[in-house]
Amino acid sequence: EPEVTQTPSHQVTQMGQEVILHCVPISNHLYFYWYRQILGQKVEFLVSFYNNEISEKSEIFDDQFSVERPDGSNFTLKIRSTKLEDSAMYFCASRGLVEGTEAFFGQGTRLTVV
Amino acid sequence: GQQLNQSPQSMFIQEGEDVSMNCTSSSIFNTWLWYKQDPGEGPVLLIALYKAGELTSNGRLTAQFGITRKDSFLNISASIPSDVGIYFCAGSGNTGKLIFGQGTTLQVKP
């Protein structure tokens, strides 16, 4: 069964460093999303991406964040200068174009900023 | 912004018991979804609801999309130990963006 794949599963980085989280969405999907979940809290929407551009973003997704689809398969989230409060699980999700198909989530990347 | 209120926050039940949890919103959603999350894993879709009033089952799970489009409930019948986890409701509008509830942590005592 097709699945969303995220790498790495765990990333530890020093405050102020740049990190790039990687996702390979399901191959025929066209909508891509990043969500984050701070430990013990709910899942929060960060950004949606369609047709090679951001379609919507939340207040959390400030200038420190960016997304890119560098080729036909990868979808990345970059945090330019990490802060302690960026520590969270980051989930990538993808969705097909057909109405009624819902988003499938990857296993997540646990980002720890020290 | 849009928010979902999910309750209860946690439940500790005996194996075999039925479980009910619900979500309410001040906003209308086009789609209601229920996900389950195991520790260290991503959310896994359990049930998707697309029409107001819709009642859908998936095995021992039953969920309904409220008539007002502002609420949904999830029932689990005859709970088993592997039902343990965190259950999230999520609402979706036209953009496909998901707004999640705070989650219900379910523990099942064998």
Image (cartoon, coloured by chain):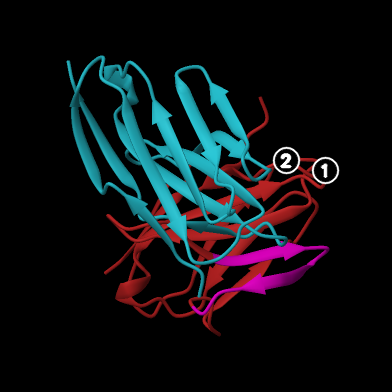
Chain colours: A red, B cyan
Q: Is residue A95 left or right of residue B20?
A: right
Above-or-below relation of B107 to A107? above
- Same chain for mark 1 and mark 2? The answer is yes
Residue visible at 50% across and 17% down in the picture: B59
Q: Main secondary structure of the magenta part?
A: strand
Q: Is A84 part of what is drawn in magenta?
A: no
Q: Is residue A8 visible?
A: no
Q: Is residue A68 visible?
A: yes
Above-or-below relation of B37 to B80? below
Q: Are marks 1 and 2 in contact (CB under 8 Å)?
A: yes
| Residue most extreme to the bottom | A63
Residue visible at 32% across and 39% down in the picture: B39
Q: Nearer the viewer, residue A68 or B88?
A: B88
Which residues are the magenta region? A46-59
Residue A78 in which image quadrant: bottom right
Q: Chain of mark 2?
A: A
Q: Is A57 part of what is drawn in magenta?
A: yes
The residue carrying pointer 2 sits among few (fewer than 14), some (14 to 19) or many (20 or more) residues within 10 Å by Cα, namely: few
Quarter in which the C terminus of chain B is drawn: top left
Q: Say what amino acid the circle numbered 2 marks.
A: Thr
Residue A54 screen position, x and y as percent: 72, 71
Q: Which residue is mark 2?
A: A101
Q: Say what amino acid the circle numbered 1 marks.
A: Val
Q: Which residue is mark 1?
A: A98
Label 2 residue SS: loop
Q: Is residue B49 left or right of residue A73?
A: left
Residue A108 screen position, x and y as percent: 47, 48
The residue carrying pointer 1 sits among few (fewer than 14), some (14 to 19) or many (20 or more) residues within 10 Å by Cα, namely: few
